[in-house]
Image (spheres, coloured by chain):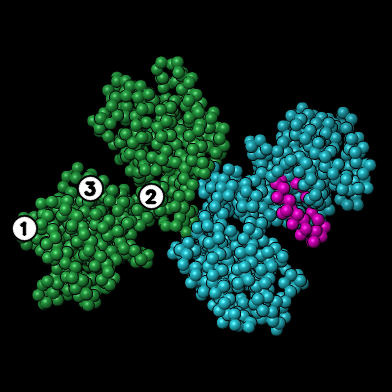
Chain colours: A cyan, B green
Amino acid sequence: MKVTQKIAQCERENKIWWSFEYFPPRTAQGLQNLLDRIERMRGLGPEFIDITWNAGGRTSELTAELVKTCQGLVGIETCMHLTCTNMPKEKVDIALREAKNSGCRNVLALRGDPPMGKEEWEAVEGGFVHGIDLVRHIRREYGDYFDIAVAGFPQHQTLPPEEQELEMKYLKEKIDAGVNFIFTQMFYDVDIFIDWVKAVRAAGITVPIVPGVAPIQTWNGFQRATSLARTVIPQTFSQALEPHKANDEKVREIGTKLVAEMCRKILNANLDIHGLHFYTMNLERGTKMLLEELNLVPRMETVKPLPWRQSLTPTRRQETIRPIFWANRTKSYISRTENWDEYPNGRFGDSRSPAYGELDGYGVSIKQSREDALRLWGQPSTFAEVADLFVQFCVGKLDALPWSDQKPLKETSIISEQLARMNSLGFLTINSQPAVNGAKSNDKVFGWGPRNGYVYQKAYLEFFVKPALLTLLLSHIERDSNITYYVINKRGDLRTNTHSEGPNAVTWGVFPGKEIVQPTIVESVSFMAWKDEAFELGQQWARVYDPDSDSAKIISELMDKCYLVNVVHNDFHDADAIFKPFFQAGEEYRASVANTPNGSVNGH
Amino acid sequence: MKVTQKIAQCERENKIWWSFEYFPPRTAQGLQNLLDRIERMRGLGPEFIDITWNAGGRTSELTAELVKTCQGLVGIETCMHLTCTNMPKEKVDIALREAKNSGCRNVLALRGDPPMGKEEWEAVEGGFVHGIDLVRHIRREYGDYFDIAVAGFPQHQTLPPEEQELEMKYLKEKIDAGVNFIFTQMFYDVDIFIDWVKAVRAAGITVPIVPGVAPIQTWNGFQRATSLARTVIPQTFSQALEPHKANDEKVREIGTKLVAEMCRKILNANLDIHGLHFYTMNLERGTKMLLEELNLVPRMETVKPLPWRQSLTPTRRQETIRPIFWANRTKSYISRTENWDEYPNGRFGDSRSPAYGELDGYGVSIKQSREDALRLWGQPSTFAEVADLFVQFCVGKLDALPWSDQKPLKETSIISEQLARMNSLGFLTINSQPAVNGAKSNDKVFGWGPRNGYVYQKAYLEFFVKPALLTLLLSHIERDSNITYYVINKRGDLRTNTHSEGPNAVTWGVFPGKEIVQPTIVESVSFMAWKDEAFELGQQWARVYDPDSDSAKIISELMDKCYLVNVVHNDFHDADAIFKPFFQAGEEYRASVANTPNGSVNGH
């Protein structure tokens, strides 16, 4: 979505909005950390994020890659910087094309700083000379596909009047060339900023102005940033901060209050400015403190429009429904459905035909290196020891399992005791959700979707189980007419008690003025596709170990002999009912094998 | 659906089933009465009905018409009788083609009785001679599209052995020609029936046998039917019934017990027979008493698979969603969407483009004759008198309004007081439903759909209102962020507070193993189409009266000046919230016009 659309939407809803800027990091580890941080900071509710272009080119492909990842996997609207520095026209076009393919609709067009080691800016052969040339080029080549932003310099208010006028003339020309909004450089003197905004408006420029706000994180950082950009620092700032310059904690605390005060002044200055753009410097803390100080809490819709993360690439934006099987493995789902022409929009049944991608694609492998795996999971040598790892995961004492990249979701903690008990009884759970009978859509744990709605879930469990225990379980399950299940083995023999081919909606929401949204489903076609992946992940875990080791043998045997089962309890009014047959069957089984010294996978 | 599929489904679910047979009546009034009765008796839960063919031809088109109406408008699976009597091949083909077009998939192929006034049966020129010829013809021409039934005669067990054998040979030949099941003629001697079934099975016939059961309704009727068909009457029957032959009530009472006992014996005789076909003789009482005596209550699914009546014609069978506007006018909706190629299946959004048929079609007129109208509604001459008619309708004291063919639904009675108050305040309601927060799907009042489900409704109101009162109402409505509305006038100026074009689901159900079903919606495109009809019905009401009369003027002015409004309260947890703005605005308005002696449509 375009930034100006976002701005308009927030204005309609009378809401203050904010956005975050990041820069491409220098190392691979830095990249992973940044992505994790962007993902976490998404929870702070930015309407969009902004990725800078790194003059000098080494990281320019990284910018495009970051934009792609943020749009496609993180699912957050992104604005891409693009500079003329060291950029022949061809490279500009590649960057724009990639941005478009990623679903990015916003470009900040800059001339850019001189490349590293050069004092003076000069255009490359066949490149653009001025920012305005880049603006014109984007408009010419891409019509109105992109929102184009340019930088605004409040600091220019401190120039001599004739220079001020000249700069304003340049800005007006750029706007007239087709610019949609202005990001300002950082500033700390709010009066200078307000003056400048008035001057911009007086020059006949009407596009939205987005003030760039740099949280004060440390004394040194503050000094470096302001001196580099020759930012005017108000006396109040220096007087309040300098006495504490050795104490970063204190600097951040005072700085937060100062900058927050500045932000309040901007928002209350009748400038028709209702949004703030934060220069995060790839740091989380300062921005978070500032938002808290300003009492800015994310719009629910911004944070969680659906219970799972949406991809914002153009082809996938309409996707509103997914099988629950990949709930813990978003990336592999996106990768395995990459070649679909259309994504299920409201009804999965309509799009069940497209084939799922092969297992050799990106994402269908355990995330852990051999070292990680050994550290996390040790060397289990019996079924009981394997089961214990699952128990540890359920109670939050283990960070990952081969089937889950992350710790259990907050909502699962509500049933963590029951899950732990199931696992200790031999049902190795790899996915689950508790029943929810109409939580408010802004509920902290279960909520998603627009305001004033209600969300629902049917209880769901997915697990590996030994054949003998499965038989016992099914005899108990069949006493409860509200349970539907699918059982499958590695070979693909499917067994179910459902009568229809169609999907079972297990998560849905009811919202004002809308159709019922049913974003998560269980059904057989996708379960078959998931099955391969689920068994493969277990086999990969086995291959972490020496083939002759007990660990390799027990895990491999488990994957060969166990069944993968999913169970839905369809009465979402009864949150505990789903566990009953498991506890009953599990206890019976335990009693029956009490005399067996060492439970093999085949059971008794 | 084919009868054998219905039978198989009931057997899977371990359920006793039943069906009703009707014959085409002789008069137009009789036809209307029969349709009303079929509609009512649908509530008794027959899996299908069966329409006889009238030998002699006069009513043969009527059979086809009845089949079409039952499939398409009543929405009940139908089996059509077809006889060879007086039927040249061309007429047979017309009947089959029409049946197929109506969605009928079951034909009972009979030779038939000799036509009226003839003793001996004879084939017409170019017609079929034996039932088996008709069976072969249907199979040849229609493949396996139709289930073909033939008649079975348990009475044949009383014939001499060689005749028995011959008849059984004929039956076997017919079965081998492609018959799917057997309806038996009526009988009262259960032992004869059981013997005959065993003989049928011994002859290698394996298709389902459906026993034909004739309730005993009056002594004379019983005598006439049994003597006509030479039915063996067990002594127990005669002994129990004859003493009461002058008392029909008593005959029915005793007869019900006798026939019920016979039915129990059949069902418990280990014959693999789990269904009963009732010869209703177009009467309701006897069949109803028999079902009650047998403790046979309809399957919920049979009675109400969706909250509104489904049409079973081939093109419409997949229809699972409808705009709420026609809730009280099913026939006009079906007629106005007759030319649609596809009907919304789960998502109305997908099928919003098809144009609604014109208003001049069948059904888009008030049902009442001028006499009915005058009797029902008298000659209201002020707005208050018109409003009072709406009040009377809400509290059940008036049988119909131009916008509703029938009395308010049972479920509406829950809010009848509030509706009456609304109308007395000047909001002339023509449609409504109360909020329902998860009633069981077998709930007597609100239930629909498969077992073990939950059904929901958002509160809905639709009404005509004067401009001044509307203005006041909207100011109150806008204080409740959970209310969405559409306002339209006769000219088609639409006003809404909804932000999306999409439908608002106002009735939905959650069922085991299924997607969420959302059969009733509110949205603008269909509201626009309904608007024409709603205003037209009012104008037709006005035209009932002399153009110069006060009644004509007030109603016509009402249609010209009033707005048609629909309102949804999106928080279905709060059943009363929808009425608040109406009561507030209504009372304020009443106070403000207290001094106006005669409220005109324009208000003050």
Magenta-tinted stretch: A20-48
On the image, the x and y values in percent for residue B226 come to 12, 60
Identify the chain of the residue marked 1, using the numbered disc in the image.
Answer: B
Name the residue that disc number 2 marks.
B444
Identify the chain of the residue marked 2, using the numbered disc in the image.
Answer: B
Marks 2 and 1 sit apart, C-alpha to C-alpha, by 51 Å
On the image, the x and y values in percent for residue A273 come to 73, 34
- Whether tag 2 and tag 1 are in contact, CB under 8 A, the answer is no
For label 2, the SS is loop
Q: Nearer the viewer, mark 2 or mark 1?
A: 2
Name the residue that disc number 3 marks.
B34
**Who is closer to the viewer here, B411 or A286?**
B411
On the image, the x and y values in percent for residue B500 come to 55, 41
Q: Residues within 10 Å of mark 2 (few under 14, many from 20)?
A: few
Q: Which mark, by number, is residue A213?
A: none
Q: How many marks?
A: 3
Amino acid type for the residue under numbered disc 2: Lys
**B599 to the left or right of A468:** left
Marks 3 and 2 sit apart, C-alpha to C-alpha, by 25 Å
Q: Nearer the viewer, mark 3 or mark 2?
A: 2
Name the residue that disc number 1 marks.
B118
Quadrant assignment for the C terminus of chain A: bottom right
On the image, the x and y values in percent for residue B344 come to 43, 49
Identify the chain of the residue marked 3, using the numbered disc in the image.
Answer: B
Amino acid type for the residue under numbered disc 3: Leu
For label 3, the SS is helix
